[in-house]
Image (cartoon, grey):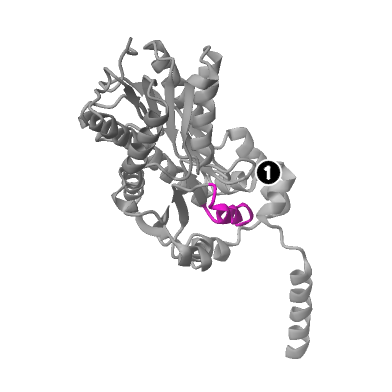
Amino acid sequence: MVHALLDLFTKIQGREMQKKRITIKDIARDCGVSLSTVSLVLNNNPRISESTRQKVLECVRKHGYQPNYQARGLASRSSRIFAVAVPALHHVFADIYFGEIVSGIYERAAEDGYKIMLDIANGNYVDNKEYLNLLKSRRADGLLFIGSSIEHEYLCEFEHEPYPFLLVNHYFPGRSLNYITVNYEESARLACEHLLSLGHRKIGLITGLNTYTGRDFRDAFLDNGRKNGINEKDLVQIGGGDMWDQEGGYNAARKLLDQHPDVTAIMAGNDRMAMGAIRYIQSRGMHVPNDISVMGADNVPSSPFFTPAITTIDHDLLTVGRLACSQLFALFKGEITECREVLPVSLVKRESTGPARG
């Protein structure tokens, strides 16, 4: 009798196991919504509209769907750490650009009890695929990469990986990578129009060109100049490579003025380059802005305290870092499935720009 009952139980159990288990993907497909929407409904998230909530719950009841709590528990395991990677640059952590963004990330992460793990993307980091391994091993819940350049093509692996990842203040055209960046085209337009409003018609542009955002800025600045009637020969570009620091600005300004001493304004790709350019101009016994106006971008904290105080485009890097961290939280929690966000910018007028001489 006992053996007969055991046989019957085994057969029933076998038939049940053969039945196809309904998954969250089946629910999403049947409802015509995303996986993240179903997840938000099952977790009673208030962001979901009542009509969508009822639609999903009706589908759940129809299929008799039971969430796999064991799997959900595994998925919810959190290291409570976000990884932050920066390129292998000389004294990278002393750079105010990276410092401002990292500060914003840290502030936002701390609000949710998270820590950040800082990494330099050197040769070993890339060769060993540490950018993927730290997420696969759950040493970190997500990765933010600051300061990526056109050479960092290996990051495109994240197109095919499920891990939370976000490019900070950069993007890769034509790639489906998550990013958050400021509007560099608008930044260039504001800068160009400001210099033109001061009567400048011979303008030098010095900037690095190893980032897509840097190239966007260059193209938009030159395009706005042409649209406003500036001759091609009067818009001079000196740049290339990764010359984004004070030394790069100093050397670029020297090259620019040696070749084109008649320029009345210099537009630098960022405030650090503007500082270097001003120092070189002053070394030649010239005055900023009476002889040459100089303008930067980013509005780093030292810009208003430089001599002269630097006219710039405010990119609010601290907020860039905070919002990047917030969006990484949303990706990790399944509240969003992608992020393609462009942030506004604004003009900040200070002492380093003035009317064109003559």
In magenta, the rendered stretch is 150-164
**Crowd class of label 1 (few under 14; some 14 to 19; many from 20; radius 10 Å):** some
What is the x, y in percent for residue 267? 40, 27
Q: Which image quadrant is residue 13 in?
A: bottom right
Q: Is residue 156 magenta?
A: yes
Place of residue 81 in the rendered image (x, y in percent of width and height, measured from the top left) = 39, 58
Is residue 1 one of those drawn in magenta?
Answer: no
For the residue labelled by badge 1, is the local secondary structure a helix, a strand or a loop? Answer: helix
Is residue 317 rendered to the left or right of residue 61? left
In the image, what residue occupies the spot 28% across and 34% down?
Answer: 280
Q: Amino acid at mark 1?
A: Glu
Residue located beneath label 1 in the image: 58
Relative side of 109 to 141, left or right? left
- State whether residue 171 appears in this view: yes
94 displayed left or right of 63: left
Position above or below: 271 against 36: above
